[in-house]
Image (spheres, helix red, strand yellow):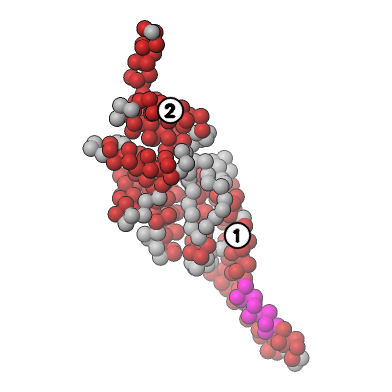
Amino acid sequence: MSTLVRRADLLDVELPKAVWSRSGRPTLGRISRTLFASTLVLLGLAMPWPAVSFGLLIAGVAGFVLIPVITDLIIERGEGAFRRATAADADAKLASLDQRVLISAFAPDAWVTLQRARLQLAKGDGRAAAQALADTARIIGQPDHPELVAAQARALLLAGDRAGARTHLSALAERGELSPRARLDLGVIMLGEAGNAEAAREHLQAAYDGLDGHPQAAAALAVALARADQSERAMELLAEAEAKAADGDELAADSIKKARKALRPAREAAKKKRRKG
């Protein structure tokens, strides 16, 4: 797993190298790799000097084996730029996926679609991100991969498709594979469902604890507690979220807005009480 710092907006997608590196690769790269190796092997077989012949044979075989290994190491080291993408530079990085020969010719297919998903999430295009994540899951042959399913749910939530996100999160819940971020998303969705207020609070509290008080979780939990007449704690959480929320974090901003609205009666009552006092 990556040791990079988690994105402030929680738009992270984790997929181990052991998974994406096993996916298929572009035809151009496979042909180039085969031609390179076969050329050295044929030259080695044609050489009359044993030492040179043996060296070329070894180089050909080693090249065939090591080219994908070296390629994966290089692109993995450059992955941080895609993970840290912002809305301002996402389009340029999307173009680089097609323009850089190392990527377009040699990178594993699943790695490329994974970066597309990350960049679309950075842009705020949840629909395109969800499609890229679905493509990644299809390529690796794991449509139920927990991280990819949870990421699709978050992408759909970003796109405003709560029903689609709910379907993915419910599947994870049935398998007992809800991460803290997935519980946050499920709790946010449940806040809008009649009869699920208590379950929403449970998920949001677990998310708040599991995500170390992330502003998205703090604001969403503030909404849930405000609706449960726990206004004092809700106001504390709202203040915490307002102070820590990152610029451009749309999901945090939306929950903060809802928390302010839910706490308006309590705040007005507190003001009247202070005036009387």
Name which quarter of the figure residue 275 lies in. top left
- Judging from the image, what secondary structure is the residue with disc 2 in? helix
Which residue occupies the foreground of this view, 10 or 276?
Answer: 276
Label 2: how many Cα within 10 Å (few below 14, some 14–19, many 20+): few
Q: Which mark is residue 236?
A: 2
- Judging from the image, what secondary structure is the residue with disc 1 in? helix
Q: Position of residue 86 (x, y in %)?
A: 55, 42
Dominant secondary-structure state across the stretch colored magenta: helix
From where the camera sits, is residue 160 visible? no
Name which quarter of the figure residue 257 lies in. top left
Instruction: Examine the rendered structure and indicate whether residue 27 appears above or below residue 93.
Output: below
Instruction: Examine the rendered structure and indicate whether residue 104 appears above or below residue 150.
Output: below
Residue that lies at the very extreme toward the left in this rendered image: 195
Spatial CA distance of label 2 from label 1 is 44 Å
From where the camera sits, is residue 108 visible? yes
Q: Position of residue 157 (x, y in %)?
A: 38, 43
Give the mark count. 2
- Magenta segment: does it hold 62? yes
**Residue type for callout 2:** Glu
Which residue occupies the foreground of this view, 187 or 257?
Answer: 187
Instruction: Examine the rendered structure and indicate whether residue 66 appears above or below residue 76.
Output: below
**For the point 46% across and 32% down, which residue is it?**
241
Nearer mark to the viewer, of 2 and 1: 2
Q: Position of residue 5 (x, y in %)?
A: 56, 47
**For the point 38% across and 35% down, which residue is it?**
221
Circles 2 and 1, Cβ within 8 Å, touching? The answer is: no
**Residue type for callout 1:** Ile
Instruction: Examine the rendered structure and indicate whether residue 45 appears above or below residue 194.
Output: below
Q: Position of residue 128 (x, y in %)?
A: 44, 48
Residues shaded magenta: 56-66
Residue of label 1: 75
